[in-house]
Amino acid sequence: MIALWDRYERRLIGLLGAFALMIGTYQIAGRYIRPDWAAPWANEVGVYVVVWAVFIAGSNLVATDSHVRPDLVLRVLSPQARRVVEIGNSLAALAFCAGLVWYGILIVADALEFDERSLSPLAFPMSIYYAALPLGTLLMSVRYVLRLYRLLFRFRAKDAAMFPISHE
């Protein structure tokens, strides 16, 4: 199940990145080759797509232990001490993500209530753009819960190399 989640998440990030690249290429071609092709909405949509990709990628970063972390400190710790530090890190990150989910939902609700739209001719609903925050951090929160479960109940000191979480 987790492997399927990883695969679809990476594919979605890749598709969003490719779409942003296509939009950017179209905008550049329109600006320099055929100015009548230039789309006033392209830069805006490109930013929205990249923001969604970044927030979804955060979940994958948690899953692969690629978030910013004190690697130098972790390298000198014993496996058990590393486990304690990683549990603390995961709890702090989970609390931070939970706050971002909560406040992100409030931001989306406000945008929906006020029917907030972008100022461009596209008049894009900002609630869709803002929804990247709570959704992305919710995905990260689930990853941190899985990480905590592994650290608390499935940790084996003999398997701990640099990072104590193994992918199955």
Image (spheres, rainbow, N blue to C red):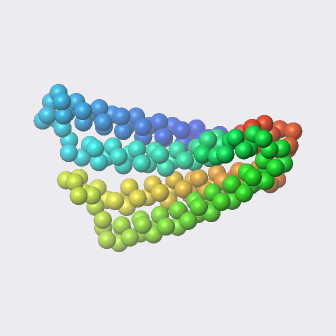
Q: Quadrant of the C terminus?
A: top right
What is the tally of numbered marks visible in this picture?
Answer: 0
Task: Answer above or below: position of 28 versus 136.
Answer: above
**Whole-percent x and y of residue 131?**
43, 58
Task: Answer above or below: position of 71 versus 33.
Answer: below
Which residue corresponds to the image point at 12% horizontal and 35% vertical from the top-left?
A: 36
Q: Quadrant of the N terminus?
A: top right
Left or right: residue 22 compared with residue 9: left
**Whole-percent x and y of residue 44?**
29, 48
For this orientation, the residue located farthest to the left is 36
Task: Answer above or below: position of 24 versus 133.
Answer: above
Picture quarter containing residue 77?
Answer: top right
Left or right: residue 108 compared with residue 150: left
**Whole-percent x and y of residue 151?**
77, 51
Residue 162 in view here: yes
Picture quarter containing residue 127?
Answer: bottom left
Pick whichever, 161 or 41, lies toward us.
Answer: 161
Left or right: residue 9 compared with residue 110: right
Residue 165 in view here: no
Which residue corresponds to the image point at 47% horizontal and 63% vertical from the top-left?
A: 104
Pick whichever, 128 or 31, lies toward us.
Answer: 31
Which residue corresponds to the image point at 60% horizontal and 45% vertical from the top-left?
A: 67
Picture quarter containing residue 34?
Answer: top left
